[in-house]
Amino acid sequence: PARTAMYSGFSWARQSLRGLGPNDAFERWAAGVFSGIPESLVVTPLQLVKVRLQAKEHLGRYQNALHCVRTILAEEGAV
């Protein structure tokens, strides 16, 4: 999922920025900057759940990944 989000974000940003910058290098640079946003939005929550499920201090607290997500959202919120 991480690479899919990154490359999709890069492709979308590159198309959106086409012709706005002074040259092609600027477009690639700006698209690279923007490609990290969707990757972070996808990967960070997945990493949080993975770490919570594997951490010693949380062993037995969560039944499965979905229960972990529900518990985190209920106790800590989405942000």
Image (tube, helix red, strand yellow):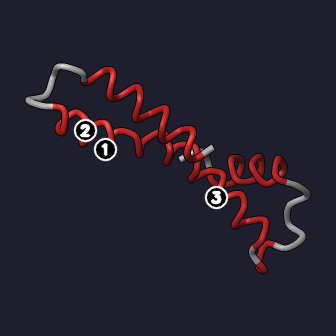
Marks 1,2: beta carbons within 8 A? yes
What amino acid is found at the position of numbered circle 1 in the picture? Val
What secondary structure is found at the residue carrying circle 3?
helix
Where does residue 47 sit, x and y in percent of width and height?
64, 58
User: Quick one: 34 or 49, which is closer to the camera?
Assistant: 34
Residue 5 in the image: state x and y as whole percent.
53, 38
Residue at which label 2 appears: 30
Viewer-proximal residue among 11 and 56: 11
Q: CA distance from mark 3 to mark 2?
A: 26 Å
Coordinates of residue 20 in the picture (x, y in percent): 15, 22
Q: CA distance from mark 1 to mark 2?
A: 5 Å
Whole-percent x and y of residue 53?
Answer: 78, 65
**In this orientation, which residue lies closer to the viewer: 55 or 74?**
55
Q: How many numbered marks does the figure carry?
A: 3
User: Mark 2 or mark 3, which is nearer the start of the sequence?
Assistant: 2
**Residue at the image position 40 percent from the left and 25 percent from the top:** 12
Q: Could you tell whether 25 is left or right of 57 in the image?
A: left
Q: Which residue position holds label 3?
A: 47
Q: Is residue 20 left or right of residue 8?
A: left
At label 2, the amino acid type is Ala
68, above or below 70, in the image = below
Quarter holding residue 25: top left
Report the quarter where the N terminus lies.
Answer: top right
3D distance between C-alphas at marks 3 and 1: 21 Å
- How would you rate the neighbour count of disc 1 (Cα within 10 Å): few for under 14, some for 14-19, many for 20 or more? few
The residue tagged 1 is: 33
At label 3, the amino acid type is Gln
- Circle 2 packing at 10 Å, graded few (<14), some (14-19), many (20+), is some
Residue shown at 64% from the left, 59% from the top? 48
Viewer-proximal residue among 50 and 59: 50
Looking at this view, name the residue that lies furthest to the left.
22
Which residue sits furthest bottom? 56
